[in-house]
Each structure stands twice: as structure tokens, then as C-alpha cells.
Image: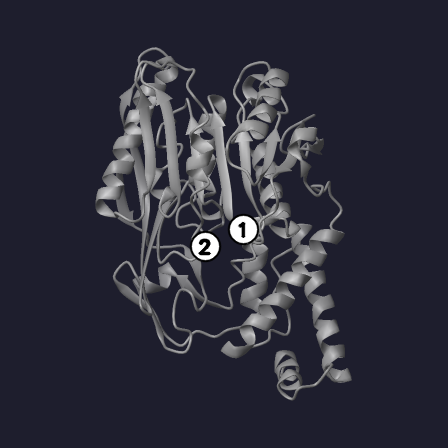
């Protein structure tokens, strides 16, 4: 009998407390899980939790709580700068995070962190605001003003100040990725934030940054809202924004760095995707008549705040692209353990119907079809796709995605890759929690695929 079975029997028998043995086993398991998570936070992950514990479906909710509690304790004990409990943003409370020197030398990110309004029962919505490329002190102060005055209460704001300027003035570089992933991990572990109401937005340079981050981190977001920007879509594939709401507002006379044209290309891409997948690509992209680089910024966050994340979409489109040399290892319920080709992008399309999971995994080739003559900016692209013949990935599953009581069929590039009942285990829960750091994504089951074996 496993530990959860002992707990369940004690509860079913109406016991006021668990048996001594069950409590001892549970405490030992909790300690071992905390140690495993602590190792993962220190970059020592990769070893399986031993021995693994197989779970009955009825045991999953209780084990999910135990796993998440172990994750919270490991985070609490992890030696790092912590987000404080948010105080009213009107007070202008600020903090600082040091960026590891290996990612960006001599860099410290100051930030404002605060709330407005009363905390909802499910937690505050979280807004990450990225400022523009003017004088950093002034831009950061503007961000605090927006946080105080935009009509999106109740909410919590994280308003960072760019650590450096010049060539390092990019919100998507690896030093800043460290900060965003730390923010997501700590915010989700804080108990203060609604996991399904996280929003990224920004203005000008922050518009470019938030458009890239929206595509890169879409699985954490309910919506994203760049303004006065416009990224080449190779930098921010629109396909990845399936299942979130996306806003982009730019003046139609904002000609600098082709912001008007790139916003138009983004609109064309989202319109085309929405025509193919009407429920998948909600967007509000507009070129504001007669306006240049300065527009009314107030409408964006009220629009964003109307949307909630679906953490378990049954249709996922993911172009695995790099930002500053770094790839995500997971997206929604997909985790990549071996990329098909190290020097190419990969597209993963997942479509779940009933207990049938249809995966398409393809290598991507980009070709530039439009380049500006002044700065050499690649503006528009074509893509060609070819089926991947190698690579490994895992599909995490729960009862929101499939019926765990029945057999599951996985097809990859038209070939049956798996058929059978998936096994629920503690390993799956630990590994998915360590991958995503997300209370909504502690998955009890998984199917692992080796694409090369399907070619034989």
C-alpha cells in the first residue's frame, strides 16, 4: 500500500488523525520531495525520484497538494532575493534583483512591486510593464505612474528598470529572461497571484520586448499588449499566441523602424490564423489614424484584464524559437528532451480529440522576402516545413486533457506512436512541477516519444 492509500484509508475511516506510520511515511516523503526540488532549483536536476510511486486516479488530488507544498517549501528555503508581499503601489515600494554575471555583467534590475485594490479570492491579476528607450529613470517613473493610474484594479504590478543601456537595452536578452522566469516562479509560489491572470505589456522598446515575450512565454499568459511597437514576426511567431488574447496598438504614422508596417504584418498574420482557428487567436490589433509614436496608452490593460488563461488547451501551436540563444524546454503540456535539429526551429502542433492526441512535429526553414534598404531589417518571411525524423519529447496529461481511465492514442506525423492506458505517478508530478513552476501544471501522467524510433 502506498502512502496516499494509507492517507485515503485513514480519512475514509473517519480518523481524526493519520496513523503514526502514515504520518511518518508522509513526512518522510515530503522531506524527500523538498530535497529533490531544492536540487532542481540549484541546477542539479536530471535524476529520477526514487522509488517512484504509482498513483490511482482517486489519489491524484491529494498528491498534487503534497507536491505543490513541497515545491513551496523548497522555494522558501532557496537562497535568493525574494519578492516581498505586495504593498499599495501608491507608496512606490521598490526592490532590486542582481542579474548573474554569467548572463550580464554588472547588471542589477530595480523594480517597483505593488498592488491596488482589494485582493480577489483567487489572487491578484499580475501585470508586467516594460518601459521604452528614453532616459531610464524617467521611463521607470512613467511606468510607476501608469501602474497607479491605469483602470485595471484590482491588480499587482511589476515595473522593472532596464539594468543597462546601449546594446544591452533589450528586454528579451538572457539576463532579462532570468528575471522574467524568476518573477513567474516566485509570483506563482507567493499565493498572492491568480495563476490564470498574468499579463505582459509595454511601450516602444517595451512594445518590442512584450511582443517577443508574449510569443516565448504564452503558456503562462492570459493576454499580452505591446504598444507603439511592431516586431518582425520571425522574432515573435504569431502562432504561439494561440489560446491567449493579443493586443497591439500603433499609430498609423509611426514610421520609425517600420513600426506601422510591422504592425500591419502582425495584423495580417493574426487575421489569417483566426480565419483558420476562430476560437484560437483573439486579437485587437489596430493602427490608430493620424497618430505617430505617441498614442493613448490607457485602453490596453482594461482590455487585457477581461481574459483568463486556459492552462489546458487541447489545441497547441508552438514554434520553438530561440531568444538570445536560449530555447524553452517546455510549452503548455509539451516538454522537449532532445531537439530534432540543433540549428533549426521546430514546430509542434498538438490536437486532442477525446483520447486521441495528434502531434505534428516539423523542422522550419525561414527565407527573407522583404528587407528594408536603410537599416537592413528583415521585415517579412516565408517558411517551409519538413517532418522531423529525430528528437524526443514528452506530453504531460491530466484529467482535463484526456480520460485517464481509458486508453490514449498518440499519433506523430501520421504514425501511431503510443496506444494504451497512461500510468499516473509521482515522478510525472515532480518533473512537470519542476519544469513549469505552475500550480495548474502538476501533471500526473505522461507519454514520452522518440521520433527516430517511428522511422523504423
Which element carries disc 1, helix, strand or loop? strand
The residue located at (47%, 36%) in the rendering is 213
How dense is the environment of label 2, judged by Cα within 10 Å: few (below 14), some, or many (20 and up)?
Answer: some
Q: Are marks 2 and 1 in contact (CB under 8 Å)?
A: yes
Q: Which mark is residue 311?
A: 2
In this rendering, position of residue 450 left or right of residue 128? left
- Quadrant of the rendering where the C terminus is positioned: bottom left
The residue located at (62%, 42%) in the rendering is 182
In this rendering, position of residue 23 left or right of residue 334? right
Q: Which mark is residue 195?
A: 1
Q: Earlier in the sequence, mark 2 or mark 1?
A: 1
Quadrant of the rendered image containing residue 451: bottom left
- Residue 51 in the image: above or below residue 392: below
**Image location of residue 37, percent across then percent down:** 67, 58
**Residue 56 visible in the current orientation:** no
- Residue 12 in the image: above or below residue 342: below
The residue located at (38%, 43%) in the rendering is 240
- Quadrant of the rendering where the N terminus is positioned: bottom right
Q: Which mark is residue 349?
A: none
Amino acid at each position: 500500500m502506498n502512502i496516499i492509500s494509507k492517507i485515503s484509508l485513514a480519512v475514509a475511516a473517519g480518523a481524526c488523525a493519520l496513523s503514526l506510520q502514515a504520518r511518518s511515511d508522509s513526512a518522510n516523503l515530503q522531506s524527500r520531495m523538498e530535497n529533490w526540488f531544492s536540487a532542481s532549483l540549484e541546477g542539479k536536476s536530471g535524476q529520477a525520484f526514487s522509488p517512484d510511486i504509482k498513483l490511482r486516479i482517486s489519489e491524484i488530488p491529494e498528491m498534487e497538494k503534497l507536491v505543490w507544498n513541497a515545491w513551496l517549501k523548497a522555494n522558501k528555503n532557496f537562497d535568493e532575493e525574494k519578492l516581498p508581499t505586495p504593498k499599495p503601489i501608491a507608496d512606490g515600494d521598490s526592490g532590486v534583483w542582481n542579474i548573474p554575471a554569467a548572463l550580464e555583467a554588472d547588471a542589477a534590475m530595480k523594480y517597483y512591486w505593488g498592488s491596488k485594490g482589494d485582493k480577489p479570492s483567487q489572487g491578484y491579476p499580475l501585470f508586467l510593464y516594460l518601459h521604452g528607450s528614453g532616459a531610464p529613470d524617467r521611463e521607470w517613473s512613467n511606468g510607476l505612474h501608469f501602474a497607479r493610474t491605469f483602470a485595471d484594479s484590482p491588480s499587482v504590478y511589476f515595473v522593472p528598470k532596464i539594468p543597462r543601456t546601449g546594446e544591452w537595452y533589450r528586454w528579451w536578452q538572457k539576463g532579462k529572461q532570468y528575471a522574467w522566469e524568476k518573477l513567474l516562479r516566485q509570483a506563482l509560489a507567493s499565493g498572492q497571484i491568480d495563476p490564470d491572470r498574468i499579463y505582459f505589456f509595454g511601450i516602444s522598446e517595451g512594445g518590442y520586448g512584450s511582443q517577443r515575450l508574449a510569443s516565448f512565454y504564452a503558456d503562462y499568459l492570459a493576454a499580452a499588449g505591446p504598444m507603439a511597437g511592431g516586431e518582425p514576426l520571425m522574432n515573435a511567431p504569431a502562432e504561439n499566441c494561440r489560446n491567449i488574447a493579443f493586443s497591439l496598438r500603433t499609430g498609423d504614422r509611426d514610421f520609425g523602424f517600420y513600426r506601422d508596417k510591422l504592425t500591419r504584418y502582425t495584423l495580417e498574420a493574426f487575421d489569417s490564423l483566426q480565419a483558420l482557428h476562430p476560437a484560437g487567436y483573439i486579437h485587437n490589433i489596430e493602427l490608430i489614424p493620424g497618430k505617430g509614436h505617441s498614442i493613448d496608452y490607457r485602453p490596453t490593460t482594461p482590455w487585457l484584464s477581461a481574459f483568463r488563461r486556459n492552462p489546458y488547451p487541447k489545441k497547441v501551436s508552438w514554434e520553438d524559437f530561440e531568444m538570445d540563444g536560449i530555447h524553452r524546454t517546455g510549452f503548455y503540456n509539451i516538454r522537449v528532451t532532445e531537439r530534432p535539429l540543433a540549428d533549426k526551429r521546430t514546430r509542434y502542433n498538438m490536437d486532442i480529440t477525446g483520447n486521441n492526441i495528434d502531434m505534428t512535429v516539423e523542422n522550419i526553414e525561414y527565407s527573407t522576402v522583404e528587407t528594408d534598404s536603410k537599416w537592413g531589417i528583415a521585415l517579412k518571411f516565408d517558411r517551409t516545413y519538413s517532418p522531423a525524423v529525430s528528437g524526443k519529447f514528452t506530453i504531460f496529461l491530466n484529467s482535463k486533457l484526456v480520460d485517464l481511465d481509458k486508453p490514449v492514442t498518440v499519433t506523430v506525423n501520421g504514425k501511431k506512436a503510443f496506444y494504451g492506458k497512461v500510468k499516473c505517478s509521482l515522478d510525472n508530478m515532480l518533473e512537470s512541477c519542476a519544469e513549469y513552476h505552475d500550480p495548474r501544471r502538476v501533471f500526473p501522467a505522461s507519454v514520452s516519444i522518440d521520433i527516430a524510433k517511428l522511422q523504423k
